[in-house]
Structure formats: C-alpha cells, structure tokens
Image (cartoon, helix red, strand yellow):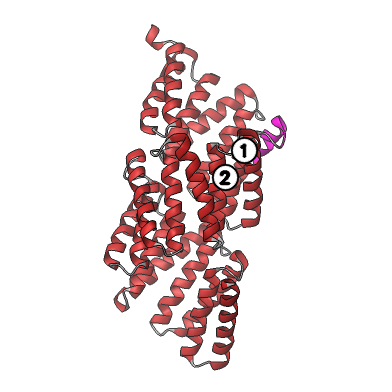
Amino acid sequence: CIRDSPEIAETYDCLGMIYKKKGLYEHARPLYVKALEIIEQVYGAGHIKVSEIEKNLADVYRKLAKWDDATELYERALVISKAQLGPEHPEVAELLNALGLIHKNTGALSQAEEKIKLAIAITEKAFGPDHIKIANCANNLADVYSIKARYDEAIKLYNRALKINETTLGHNHPEVSENLNALGMISKKRGFYKEAEEYYKRALKIVEDVYGEEHPKVALYTHNLGVVSRKLKDFKAAWEYYERGRTLNCKLMGSRHPHVGGSLNGLGMVIKESKGNLDEAVAYHMEALSIFEASLGPNSEKVALTLNLIAEVYRKQGKFGYNEAEALYLRALRINTEIFGEEHPEVAENLNGLAQVYKAQFNYTKAEPLFLKAIAISERTLGENHGHVINRYRNLADLYEKLGISEKSQATWEKWNKLKAKKEH
C-alpha cells in the first residue's frame, strides 16, 4: 500500500522536522507518530530507522514538557542504537545527551551530569574536541553546573560552546543565541544584571531575525529580559517582557506549560516589588505552583522556587501570614536540600526567609543561626560582593541591634557598609 510505504513515512518525518524547527510542536507530533507507525510496520520494531523517528518524536515531547513520554522513547531508541550501531556511536551520544536534558529539567542533576559527560566523551572520540556536536553537549553540561552553582565550571563550558558555534556556524546562528542566553543566565545569577541584559538582547535579536517574532526561543529570551529588567527596577519593561513571554508560550506550548508558570511567577514578583496588591501577586504564584506541580512533580526546583515566592508575600502581609510562610519556607528548604545539597544559593534563600519570619516574630535566638548560615553559604557560592550577601548582612546587623548586642551590631553594620560601598564602586 503506497500510503504505508517508507517514502510516505519519510515525508511525514520531514514535515515533522519543519514544524519542530518552527517551534510548532503540536503540529509536529502527529506527523512523527504516523511516520513511526509506518516504519515499525515496514521494518520491525528493532530497526535503526525506528530509533531515528523515536528520537524525533521524543524531542517534541521534551519540548512540550511531557517528560515520561520523552524518556520512554529516548530509552527505546537508545537500546536500538546501541544494538545496531555500537555503544560508542555518535547517535548513542545524542540520545544520552537528550536523556541528560530530561534529568536536568526534572531535577535529577547527578544523572544529568553522568549522561551528558558520557555523551561528550563519545563525541570527542568520534569527531575531536572542537566539533559542532560538542558545543551542544558542553552547553547542556554547563546548564547543570549553573543550576548546581558551580559557576566557574559552567562559564568555561559555555565559552567553549560559544567559540565552537561562532567558528563553525557564524555569529548570527540560533545555536550562538543559546550560548549567549546561557552566559546571560550566569551573569544574572552572579548579580551582573546589565551584563546579563546585553547577552539576552543579543540572543533575542538573533532568534527574531531567524525565526520571526513567534517562536519558543523568542518567548524564552523575552522572559529572561523581564527578569533582569525587574532586577534593575524597571518594572514597566519587566511587566511587558513577562507578559509577552506568557502570551507567546500559551500560544505555542499551551497554557499549562512550565514556561507559562515562569512568566506567571515573574508577573507576581513585579506586583510585589512595585508595591502592588499582594493578594494579586499570590494569585499569580499559586497558578504557577499548580502548573509546576502538575508538569514537574511536587518536589522540583521550580516548585521550591514558587513556594519561596509565596512565602515571601505571606511574610510581607504581616503576623497573620507568618505561620503559613514558615511552613512554605520549610517545604522549599527540604526540596532544595534534597536536590542541591546544603551548599547552594537557593538553600541560602530559604534559610534567609525563615530567619526573617522568626525575626518578625521576635524569636531572635532562632533567627540568628539561620542568618549566619545563609550568609556563609551565599559568600561561598556567590561571592561576598553579591547583592544577596550584602542584604543579609544588613538583616543580621538589624537583628543584633534589636537584641541590644552593640559590639556585634556595630561590627556587622560596618561590614555591610564596606560591602555596599565596594559594590557601588
């Protein structure tokens, strides 16, 4: 039957690839499904052609945050590729890299690191250290290190990927935009917001020039510009960037995609930080929490982040919100400690929030060790000149002042003033 021929399957596969590159994942999915059905029927389930289409379909599911469906297909493709091509074939490396991305997105960072490192080793053996395929793996491993707050290792890998891509593909290729976006993320995490803004703007211009204004990468880089605009206190620009990202992601990915949750959290933070209605801010964060719990599970990094944001709002609402805030900070702290261990900026963020709650309740003996621990972790992971460190010294100095410990209070205020002056210069 002509309609069930390999040629028809290849046509479906090619059409699916076109839609995938355009970011139209729901259009690509049924085409890959049809191609896979035909190829399995023609060649059998263990054929290498089946593995190729399973990988393409898995890529679509990964983009749609359907992690279980994507993992199942990648693993099936991996078994076939190892059997047909051998365990050190570049196709095996690509599948390991893709599985590493799934693990990264679902918080299994050790598994992500292991698989991506193996992918890099296989690819280097096959092609050498400067091949284009190395750039993608290096960028993904750098993402894992960035999440783990291993920033020096991450920057080295991001710059390696950027150099390979610019040399091989040119300065205005979409792959280069990914490297620029990643370097922007590192700059943002280290508190260099103007530097991050420049990276994001360069990345956004590239993808708008290549894909137009309606593409998932446009939505992502627009959201990231919202983050740095908010950090720079340009709340009007931040709101516009977040809202553009949310609208695009809803259109391209669906209203329950994790990226939509990120935009909702951003909008909630703009409301809170610009002295808006705190109940409205909570509503945005609650919707984001619902999306993250449904798509990523109850113990993901994004869930912990959102719990922390809701707790901050409850804390700002005063005494009636303190108990709720404490419970949310503790849940976020448990999740982040399980994912990252104790030496991570997100853990410090949760500890600082808890300390703020106890301080507001006049429970100074519980607050002091938490402030000290938050400062110590932040200094080790972010450096003492980071804004978070400076703010936490101010919190601690104020606590000592309230306790009437004048010697410690004076020393801590002096430390805060010294760091603040250094940061401003």
Task: Give the percent coordinates (x, y) of residue 409.
Answer: 54, 88
Circle count: 2
Q: Is residue 403 above or below residue 346?
A: below
The residue under the point 45% across, 41% down is 217
Q: What is the number of the mark on residue 179?
A: 2
- Which range is magenta? 118-129
Q: Amino acid at mark 1?
A: Asn
Secondary structure at numbered mark 1? helix
Task: Give the percent coordinates (x, y) of residue 144.
Answer: 57, 50
* Mark 1 Cα-neighbour bin, 10 Å: few <14, some 14–19, many ≥20: many
Depth check, front residue: 362 or 387: 387
Depth check, front residue: 404 or 46: 404
Q: Amino acid at mark 2?
A: Asn
- Which residue lies under the disc numbered 1? 165
Q: Is residue 230 above or below residue 162?
A: below
Quarter of the image holding residue 218? top left
Does the image show residue 147?
A: no
Q: Are dots 1 and 2 in contact, CB under 8 Å?
A: yes
Task: Give the percent coordinates (x, y) of residue 382.
Answer: 59, 65
The residue under the point 59% across, 72% down is 425
| Residue 396, magenta (yes or no) | no
Mark sitting earlier along the chain (1/2): 1
Q: Is residue 414 above or below residue 194?
A: below
Secondary structure at numbered mark 2? helix
CA separation in Å, label 1 and label 2 = 9 Å
Q: Is residue 140 above or below residue 35?
A: below
The answer to whether 168 appears left or right of 334 in the picture is right
